[in-house]
Image (tube, rainbow, N blue to C red):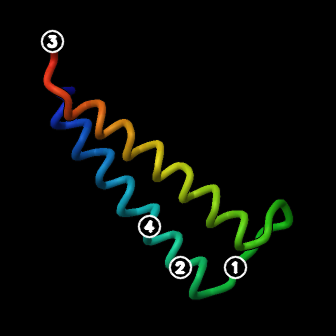
């Protein structure tokens, strides 16, 4: 898989995760493990990690 393919894949993942955050905010969904705010916080942390991966993959080699 090329860096561009990985970037596209990560961008798609970010979009899905953002949809999950919106859904959590709209529904107030929660689990027995964590309240809604904690779930959103963790998803946003994962989004930040994916953004950093994209940033690194965007740097030309060498």
Q: Nearer the viewer, residue 58 or 33?
A: 58
Between 55 and 3, the one lying in front of the other is 55
Q: Residues within 10 Å of mark 4 (few under 14, many from 20)?
A: some
> How far apart are the alpha carbons under marks 4 and 1?
15 Å
User: Which badge, 4 or 3, comes first in the chain's sequence?
Assistant: 4
Secondary structure under badge 4? helix
The answer to whether marks 4 and 2 mark residues whose Cβ atoms lie closer than 8 Å is no
Q: Quadrant of the C terminus?
A: top left
- Foreground tag (4 vs 1): 4
The vertical placement of 61 against 8, above or below, is above
Q: Where is residue 23 shown, x and y percent of the image?
A: 53, 79
The Cα atoms of the two marked residues, 1 and 2, are separated by: 8 Å
Residue topped by disc 2: 23
Alpha carbons under labels 2 and 3: distance apart: 41 Å
How many numbered badges does the structure rendering display? 4
Q: Residue at x 29, y 38 (%)?
A: 55
**Residue underneath mark 3:** 62
Q: Indicate the quadrant where residue 24 lies.
A: bottom right
Report which residue position mark 4 lands on. Answer: 18
Give the quarter of the figure containing the N terminus.
Answer: top left
The residue that appears at 38% across and 53% down in the rendered structure is 13
Q: Earlier in the sequence, mark 4 or mark 1?
A: 4
The Cα atoms of the two marked residues, 4 and 3, are separated by: 33 Å
């Amino acid at each position: 898989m090329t860096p561009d393919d990985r970037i596209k894949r990560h961008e798609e993942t970010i979009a899905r995760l953002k949809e999950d955050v919106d859904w959590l905010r709209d529904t107030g969904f929660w689990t027995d493990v964590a309240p809604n705010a904690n779930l959103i916080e963790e998803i946003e942390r994962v989004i930040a990690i994916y953004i950093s991966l994209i940033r690194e993959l965007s740097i030309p080699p060498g």
